[in-house]
Image (spheres, helix red, strand yellow):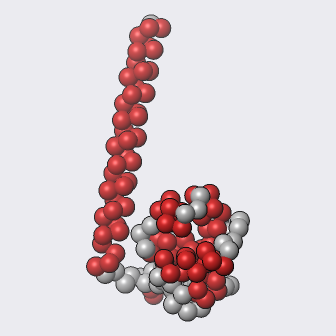
């Protein structure tokens, strides 16, 4: 709940970085880093370095980011202006449901893929153990 967090300007310049705000806006839109990279036609590593504050986008990309993520350019740069609600603001609405369901489907698919990989490895390990034994 919002009352559980200290009263700070969560996305202001003193509390967060450009990368923090970029990641928050991307998450708010239900996009993965890969999704954002594809939409901007940049490499995944580029988005990763922006969010990790290792690099900054050029001016033309900044405008594209703000528009794509539905935040103002000043908010993205400084935390001032139209942005996303800080963590703890439980303003949950209908727009949040579909991205969460999509993320759940993606996680489920990844889990199934990993389960299949584990099964294959387990089978190979059993075969190897039988051959040695």
Residue 36 is situated, as x and y percent measured from the top left of the image, at 50, 66
Q: Is residue 125 above or below residue 59?
A: above
Q: Quadrant of the N terminus?
A: bottom left
Q: Is residue 120 left or right of residue 22?
A: left
Residue 51 is situated, as x and y percent measured from the top left of the image, at 61, 68
Q: Is residue 8 visible?
A: no
Q: Nearer the viewer, residue 67 or 27?
A: 67
Q: Quadrant of residue 21?
A: bottom right
Q: Quadrant of the C terminus?
A: top left
Residue 35 is situated, as x and y percent measured from the top left of the image, at 47, 62
Q: Quadrant of residue 94?
A: bottom left
Q: Is residue 91 above or below residue 102?
A: below
Residue 56 is situated, as x and y percent measured from the top left of the image, at 69, 71
Q: Looking at the image, which residue is at 34% across and 59% down?
A: 104
Q: Looking at the image, which residue is at 64% across and 86% down?
A: 78
Q: Quadrant of residue 63?
A: bottom right
Q: Looking at the image, which residue is at 44% across and 75% down?
A: 28
Q: Is residue 131 visible?
A: yes
Q: Looking at the image, which residue is at 47% across and 82% down?
A: 70
The residue at the far right in this view is 54
Q: Nearer the viewer, residue 62 or 71?
A: 62
């Amino acid at each position: 709940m919002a009352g559980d967090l200290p009263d700070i300007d969560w996305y202001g310049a003193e509390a967060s970085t450009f990368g923090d705000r970029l990641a928050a806006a991307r998450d708010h839109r239900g996009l993965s880093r890969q999704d954002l990279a594809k939409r901007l036609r940049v490499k995944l590593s580029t988005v990763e370095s922006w969010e990790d504050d290792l690099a900054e986008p050029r001016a033309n990309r900044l405008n594209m980011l703000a528009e794509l993520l539905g935040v103002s350019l000043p908010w993205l740069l400084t935390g001032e202006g139209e942005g996303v609600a800080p963590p703890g603001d439980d303003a949950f609405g209908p727009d949040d449901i579909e991205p969460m369901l999509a993320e759940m489907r993606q996680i489920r698919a990844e889990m199934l893929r990993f389960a299949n990989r584990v099964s294959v490895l387990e089978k190979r390990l059993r075969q190897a153990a039988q051959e040695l034994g």
